[in-house]
Amino acid sequence: GSSLFHSIFVETASLETRVQISRMLGPWLASTRMGKHFKRQVDAQQRTAEGEPYADIAGTDAEGAAASLSDYVGKGNYVLMDIWASWCGPCRGEIPNLRQLHERYGNKGLTVVGIFTYDKAENLKPTMEEEQIGWPQIADTANVAMDTYGTDGIPFIVLFGPDGTILKRDLRGSAMIEIVDEIMSQNKK
């Protein structure tokens, strides 16, 4: 059963196809750990699909004070949310791209927000200093961000519109920069 869920077909299938697979699981497969995880993930992907409203994530900031994604999203700025961890090499690999966008558009209508997950909250501040991260961070102390957005992998980067609508999911690298450049050039503040 688990090989089905990890097959290239399922992993690269459109959300519509994944929803159909989720609905067609027989009672035994649906009752397995993998089946339940797949169903939960597909449900989360539907709830947080492009065009849907954002889902909030609460935690603490680098100083330990309460902070939420809703402190930033839906407040009139575009928001680029980066779900990441200090131990994740590819996550650290995206930091220069995020820094570039933060520096280019930080005062022009784009807020970059990190969601620090599956890590110790006390690792956040030292990693921010080490990587010279100058944008807000939320430690996802309940480790719910990945489940909320229906992803198994990080970094997972999502772009929200000024009203909090999900515009793009799973952005990375130069493609992310191109998309943000294009959107920000159409929305000069």
Image: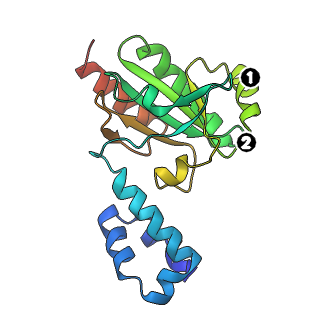
Instruction: Tell me the residue that label 2 is attached to.
Output: 87
Judge the density around disc 1: few (<14), some (14-19), many (≥20) Cα neighbours within 10 Å: few
Q: Earlier in the sequence, mark 1 or mark 2?
A: 2
User: Can you give x and y, in whole percent of width and height, for residue 177 in the image?
Assistant: 42, 29
Give the vertical position of 19 relative to 175 (above or below).
below
The answer to which quarter of the image holds residue 168 is: top left
Query: Residue pushed farthest front?
Result: 66
Q: Amino acid at mark 2?
A: Trp
The residue located at (28%, 30%) in the rendering is 163
The residue located at (34%, 69%) in the rendering is 19
Q: Amino acid at mark 1?
A: Glu
Q: Give the quadrant of the N terminus.
A: bottom right
The answer to which quarter of the image holds residue 171 is: top left
Judge the density around disc 2: few (<14), some (14-19), many (≥20) Cα neighbours within 10 Å: few
Give the vertical position of 52 relative to 138 (above or below).
below
User: Can you give x and y, in whole percent of width and height, for residue 181 in the image?
Assistant: 35, 24
Q: Give the quadrant of the C terminus.
A: top left
Colouring style: rainbow
Horizontally, residue 173 falls left or right of residue 74, namely right
Q: Nearest the camera: 56 or 169?
A: 56
User: Can you give x and y, in whole percent of width and height, for residue 32 in the image?
Assistant: 56, 81
Give the vertical position of 61 relative to 172 (above or below).
above
Q: Secondary structure at mark 2?
A: loop
Instruction: Tell me the residue that label 1 is attached to.
Output: 130
User: Can you give x and y, in whole percent of width and height, for residue 107 in the image?
Assistant: 41, 10
Query: Marks 1 and 2, Cα distance to the nearest angstrom?
Result: 13 Å
